[in-house]
Image: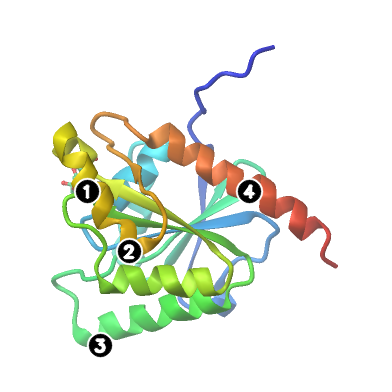
Amino acid sequence: MQRSAKSAPFATEFVKSAFALADCPQWKRAEVALAGRSNVGKSSLLNALAGAKGLARTSKTPGRTRCLNFFAVGETHAICDLPGFGYAKMSHTDAAKIAHMLVEYVQGRNNLDAVAILVDCRRGPDEEMLSLARMATERGIEVIAVATKCDKLRQSERAAARKRFESMGVAPIFCSVTSGEGIEELRRRILAVDSVETSKRAALP
Ligand code: GDP
């Protein structure tokens, strides 16, 4: 039977919130973290990946916006929705706590296989996102660059947008939840991370 080029929406289920590394779930799932500045379109993208409206509302529930939110995806994958950077109403103390938790997670989470870094395609990555990408790369964690809200770009503006991502060292997947562009490609990228890493991990004690 010929495989469909379309990937089905992820069967996604909220598992738990964690405030520290020790609270993160213990599992053999391949884990892909979603990172991005507040308002970049992270919740919309998570909902689009799962084909479920309101799924990411879980991550926006008061009390859960400042922690790591874990979702099981099918039988073998997991998504960790990281707290949004740079939320305008956040105090310096809270921002520092979140920054600390993110560094702890990216540098210390053994289960982490890939980080999808979401950046508004009209802006390009800032120093915080580049530093996150460097941190992941140093640990051998795959970086997936996602250029969000690409429906806001004209075709003629794509090349310049692509250039803005060069500093991340990986070509971005242009995504839009409005037009649907890139959603399936991102699903496939996440699934590909899983299949490579799962076989590696199976060899570990
Ligand atoms: P978050 O803070 O990163 O979770 O961002 P949200 O998912 O809440 O989105 C922030 C705003 O951007 C909302 O008004 C969304 O409707 C809008 N948005 C999100 N994704 C897209 C997109 O692909 N295209 C357009 N045009 N707007 C988007």
Local packing at callout 4 (Cα closer than 10 Å; few below 14, some 14-19, many 20+) is: many
- How far across and down, in percent of the image, does residue 180 sit? 31, 30
Ranked by sequence position, the earlier of labels 4 and 3 is 3
Q: Is mark 4 within 8 Å of ligand 1?
A: no
Give the residue displayed 30% in from the left and 57% down from the top.
60
Dot 4 and dot 3 residues touching (CB under 8 Å): no
Q: CA distance from mark 2 to mark 4?
A: 26 Å
Give the residue displayed 61% in from the left and 65% down from the top.
25
Name the residue carrying label 4: 194
Dot 2 and dot 4 residues touching (CB under 8 Å): no
Q: Say the numbered circle drawn on residue 130.
A: none
Name the residue carrying label 2: 167
Q: Amino acid at mark 1?
A: Ala
Q: Say the numbered circle drawn on residue 161.
A: 1
Ranked by sequence position, the earlier of labels 3 and 2 is 3
Q: CA distance from mark 3 to mark 1?
A: 33 Å
- List the single residue furthest toward the top: 1
Ranked by sequence position, the earlier of labels 4 and 1 is 1
- How far across and down, in percent of the image, does residue 194 sit? 63, 48
Mark 2 or mark 4, which is nearer to you?
Answer: 2
Q: CA distance from mark 3 to mark 2?
A: 29 Å
Give the residue displayed 65% in from the left and 13% down from the top.
2
Q: CA distance from mark 1 to mark 2?
A: 12 Å
Q: Is mark 3 within 8 Å of ligand 1?
A: no
Where is the N terminus found, in terms of image quarters? top right
Q: Amino acid at mark 2?
A: Ser
Q: CA distance from mark 4 to mark 1?
A: 28 Å
Q: Amino acid at mark 4?
A: Asp
Q: Element at badge 2?
A: helix
